[in-house]
Image (cartoon, grey):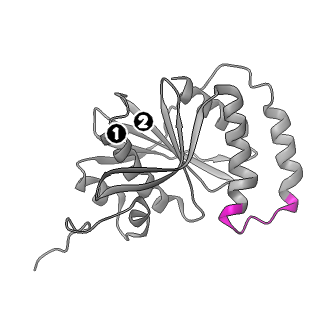
């Protein structure tokens, strides 16, 4: 009895296609030669004073009761966009929205938010479904970013956001392993720690 491969070598796949595959992360990542691990991550954090953060948290707390977050567009505009604008204020990071990337027929598609400074990358995916399946897509996107060879980094960072919940992942380029953070960050409750991490990552 032959085993049907998870990924058909003759087919073309976009990043979004991996979200739809009914497979375990380690099964998909092993196809590309990478391992998978889930554990709490000790992520970089800035020690700077983020002086506008409390104001943003208060504004979000005021508007949340009045906005319906049943659509992905609502979460992007009212929860994700304010966080990214705050991030620009502290890091002057350039953000490319809907950034197209093609490495091969198996590694191509659009990155929702592609952030780049002189020292680091951070790619953010906006999703409205379960985080485990989101992780598979973001892990494949991290592999594509590494293979695109934008720069030689030992660690590449990625985040997935459901608007009110954020989760990080890291690609260890030396170990060829994608590590899924088991910690979750809520907005606005954990906004301070979330921004400290993202600023810390982009500061390198």
Mark 2: secondary structure:
strand
Residue 190 makes an appearance in the image: no
- Considering depth in this image, is 38 or 169 the residue closer to the camera? 169
Taking 119 as reference, is 115 above or below it? below
Where's residue 49, x and y in %? 74, 21
Question: Which portion, as a residue range, is magenta?
Answer: 65-73
Quarter occupied by the N terminus? bottom left
The 10 Å Cα crowd at callout 1, few under 14, some 14 to 19, many 20 or more, is many
Q: CA distance from mark 1 to mark 2?
A: 8 Å
Q: Quadrant of residue 84?
A: top right
Q: Residue furthest bottom?
A: 1
Where's residue 166, x and y in %? 61, 48
- Name the residue at 42% across, 36% down: 156
Numbered circles on residues, count: 2
Residue 85 makes an appearance in the image: yes
Q: Quadrant of residue 197?
A: top right
Mark 1–mark 2 CB contact (< 8 Å): yes
Mark 1: secondary structure:
helix
Where's residue 14, x and y in %? 38, 62
Q: Which residue is mark 1?
A: 146
Taking 11 as reference, is 200 above or below it? above
Q: Is residue 23 magenta?
A: no
- Name the residue at 73% across, 51% down: 79
- Label of residue 156 in the image: 2
């Amino acid at each position: 009895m032959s085993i049907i491969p998870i990924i058909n070598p003759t087919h073309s796949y976009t990043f979004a296609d991996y979200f739809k595959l009914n497979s375990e992360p380690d099964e998909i990542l092993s196809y590309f030669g990478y391992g998978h691990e889930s554990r709490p991550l000790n992520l970089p954090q800035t020690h700077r004073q983020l002086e506008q953060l409390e104001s943003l948290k208060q504004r979000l707390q005021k508007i949340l009761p009045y906005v319906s977050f049943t659509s992905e567009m609502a979460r992007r505009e009212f929860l994700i966009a304010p966080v990214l604008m705050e991030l620009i204020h502290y890091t002057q990071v350039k953000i490319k929205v809907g950034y197209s990337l093609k490495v091969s027929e198996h590694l191509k598609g659009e990155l929702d938010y592609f952030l780049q400074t002189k020292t680091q990358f951070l790619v953010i995916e906006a999703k409205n479904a379960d985080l485990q399946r989101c992780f598979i897509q973001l892990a494949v996107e991290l592999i594509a970013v590494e293979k695109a060879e934008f720069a030689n980094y030992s660690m590449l960072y990625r985040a997935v956001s459901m608007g009110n919940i954020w989760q990080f992942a890291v690609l260890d380029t030396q170990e060829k392993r994608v590590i899924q953070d088991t910690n979750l960050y809520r907005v606005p409750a954990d906004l301070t720690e979330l921004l400290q991490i993202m600023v810390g990552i982009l500061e390198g």
